[in-house]
Amino acid sequence: MKKITQLPVDPGPAAWNAILPPQKARAALDSHCTADWVVIGAGFAGLSAARRLAELHPADRIVVLDACRIAEGPSGRNSGFMIDVPHDLSSDDYGGNAGNDQRQIRLNRAAIDYALQAKAQWQMSDEAIAASGKLNGAVTARGVAHNQAYAKHLDQLNEPYERLDAQSMQEVTGTHAYAEGLYSPGTVMLQPALYTRILAAGIESSRLQIYESSPVVSLEKQGSLWLVNTPEGSVSAPGVILTVNGHLQSFGYYQRHLVHVFTYGSMTRALNEKEVSALGGKDNWALTPADPLGTTVRKISGTGGHRIIVRNRATYDPSLVVDERRIARVGQDHERSFAFRFPMLKDVSMQYRWGGRLCLSLNGVSVFGEIESHLYAACCQNGLGTAKGTIAGKLIAELASGESSALLNDQLADTGPKKLPPAPIAKIGASARLKWGEFRAGKEL
Ligand SMILES: Cc1cc2nc3c(=O)[nH]c(=O)nc-3n(C[C@H](O)[C@H](O)[C@H](O)COP(=O)(O)OP(=O)(O)OC[C@H]3O[C@@H](n4cnc5c(N)ncnc54)[C@H](O)[C@@H]3O)c2cc1C
């Protein structure tokens, strides 16, 4: 029997979920049942895997278990960028290769197609998901150089983009902070909690059940079946799919191969009419930083009113836990980033602050495949799980169902994560790298 060594803890509120009307809690698993498939984890990867299993096997019984509630875990606490082109193209010392980038673009675009199909199937609003593109904003000369490098690599990949000067950036964002921007049209923007909620409700049926607050505490092979135990119930099934991202290591797999990082967000209270007009710019926009370790910013106008969300800082936390003091400390960085960009909103405070887990690997690849007989994993999304989790979830369901395709071969080309150096060296190396990167980001942070 495999005992799960650690359960997920999500620090701070899931702001995107908190600004929506409350949702009715789903039941926790409280008895024994049988199923054809169990999916563990109900984030982007888990919901996508369950959705695909239901499409491929309409008569099968599928059980989805999550330790927390839908949209409360990392899938409901991210910045909502579903990005089509590789994210690291902007670095000066970019060492990728075009073949690998094209492969990643094919996978990301397949994820976006699958999410847009869900939009059509369950009549999601543009607030939940919209093909709006995104800006890469540069504050400093160094940021502008990053955008230049980014543009060069997009040219090599034959991908479209548009460069924006400071005035055009101000017309979109309302702030004078940005010297330059690069607009790329292929990114799809999510209200991650709204999207995740509608997707979860859409896939549920008499054959597919989602249990919330149902952490898996042990996993056991019994003959040809897996027995999956939660504190108050259990499910036995021939096939199990693990979509728990970095918590894969808590299941005893890929220990010392996964890099656990937390990143942090803050969301303002709703702006009043006066503040909205003092800010100016468009109702909705989405900006990633030209320097990868800078500040991501979004302006949203929807169910929770007009708000601004900032995300920055990344910390290496192999313990998979951060405390409230960290959230408060990082909150001060958010205050600085916000005040620098939005001096016209000096009376606007942050209503929510939170953190969330990312799982990376040293060589930037995912864990994807059959890790034991009829036990499959689609984990380690390398920080871009809205797209990577969605497609890995869809494809793991196809792999487990014996399907084959060129896209599945693209995903299978990930060779598996490299082993980390001994713990103290990994800790010093990763923390120093993040701190140095953030220092160099300067005003981009
Ligand atoms: C502040 C922030 C901003 C981000 N911005 C972006 C962005 O703009 N774009 C982007 O692509 N990515 C972004 N990310 C990353 C993104 O959120 C993740 O990559 C994504 O959520 C991974 O999806 P997943 O389904 O693989 O895993 P998760 O969303 O982590 O889902 C895994 C689920 O497994 C559950 N679980 C774990 N252990 C157990 C257990 N024992 N039993 C039952 N359930 C268990 C967890 O509760 C969780 O709900 C951001 C993350 C943060 C924190």
Image (cartoon, helix red, strand yellow):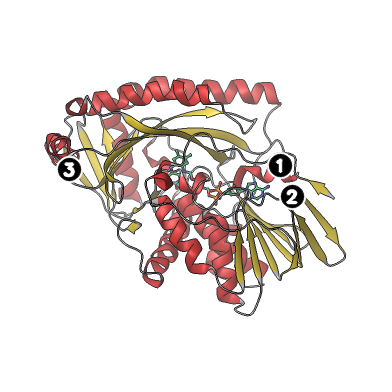
Disc ID at residue 54: none
Q: Secondary structure at mark 2?
A: loop
Which residue is the site of mark 3? 172
Which residue is the site of mark 1? 250
Q: Identify residue type, mark 1.
A: Ser
Task: Establish if 336 lies above or below 174.
Answer: above
Residue 226 visible to the viewer: yes
Location of the C terminus by quadrant is top left
Task: Establish if 403 lies above or below 434.
Answer: below
Q: CA distance from mark 3 to mark 1?
A: 44 Å
For the point 24% across and 28% down, the residue is 341
Q: Secondary structure at mark 1?
A: helix
Q: Identify residue type, mark 2.
A: Pro
Q: Is mark 1 within 8 Å of ligand 1?
A: yes
For the point 64% across and 26% down, the residue is 426
Q: CA distance from mark 2 to mark 1?
A: 16 Å
Q: Is residue 340 left or right of residue 18?
A: left
Which residue is the site of mark 2? 231
Q: Nearer the viewer, residue 87 or 445?
A: 445
